[in-house]
Amino acid sequence: MTYLEKALREGQAAGAATLNRARILSSSCFVIIYLVVIYALAIDGLKWTLPLVLVYWIVGLAIWFFANRFSNFSTISRFAIPLIDMPLVFWIQWQNLPQANSPFAVAIFGLAFFLFLTILCCYSLRTKQVLLSGGVGIVFYLLLLRLTDADIVAYIIGPILLVLTAL
């Protein structure tokens, strides 16, 4: 193994560790926001999806735990963004749509989270991984939009943003 290959592998391992820590941080913030909105602000609109957010948080903790314990798990944990994180975020947002005063705002928040996850995937230092995450984000964003009264501009701008982020 050359010095360059070794440095790349070390960078990918460090990126995977950072990605897993960021997952814990973001999902913990998500839980805190839900708890503040439901209990401190007494807004009941999100209480139906709190269990789903807790599932997301537990999954994030499990990925972080196993990635720290087993090096083989750490190398495959990079696939968690397109295969676990994005579907869970879609599921949570999809469940929020019926209770939302503005379903379009829920879809846009989903877009913001898909963009964040695509950017987070850049820590993997793998172009194909980032492009896969961007593609999965586009699919889930468009599925959320189909359930709202969005106009054609939202169908164009969101995917363009995700593609540009993945590039």
Image: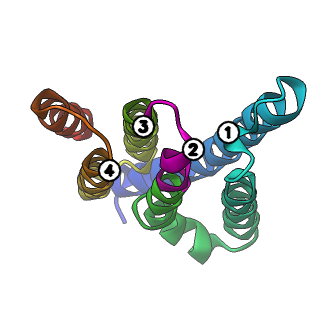
Residue type at mark 4 is Leu
**Whole-percent x, y for residue 162 in the image:** 25, 38
Mark 1 → mark 4, Cα distance in angstroms: 18 Å
Q: Which residue is mark 3?
A: 103
Question: Label 4: which residue?
Answer: 147
Disc 4 secondary structure class: loop
Mark 3, other Cα within 10 Å: few <14 / some 14–19 / many ≥20: many
- Is residue 42 part of the magenta span, yes or no? no
Q: Tell me the residue that label 2 is attached to.
A: 99
Q: Which residues are magenta?
A: 92-102
What's under tag 2, amino acid-wise? Answer: Gln
**Crowd class of label 4 (few under 14; some 14 to 19; many from 20; radius 10 Å):** some
Q: Quadrant of residue 111?
A: top left
In the image, residue 72 sits, relative to residue 18, either above or below, namely: below
Task: Choose the circle earlier in sequence order: 1 or 2.
Answer: 1
Q: Earlier in the sequence, mark 3 or mark 1?
A: 1
Report x, y in % for residue 49. Answer: 67, 53
* Drawn side of residue 71 relative to residue 139, left or right: right
Q: Which residue is mark 1?
A: 45
Cα distance in 3D space between marks 2 and 4:
13 Å
Q: Position of residue 26 (x, y in %)?
A: 65, 39
Residue drawn at the location 62% of the way across and 47% of the way down? 23
Mark 1 crowdedness (10 Å alpha carbons): few <14, some 14-19, many ≥20: some
Most prominent secondary structure in the magenta stretch?
Answer: helix
**In 3D space, how far apart are the residues under numbered discs 3 and 1 (Cα atoms)?**
12 Å
Name the side, left or right, on which 103 lies relative to 145.
Answer: right
Q: Is residue 9 left or right of residue 158?
A: right
**C-alpha gap between disc 3 and disc 2:** 8 Å
Between marks 1 and 2, how big is the CA–CA gap? 6 Å
Mark 1–mark 4 CB contact (< 8 Å): no
The residue at the far top in this view is: 41
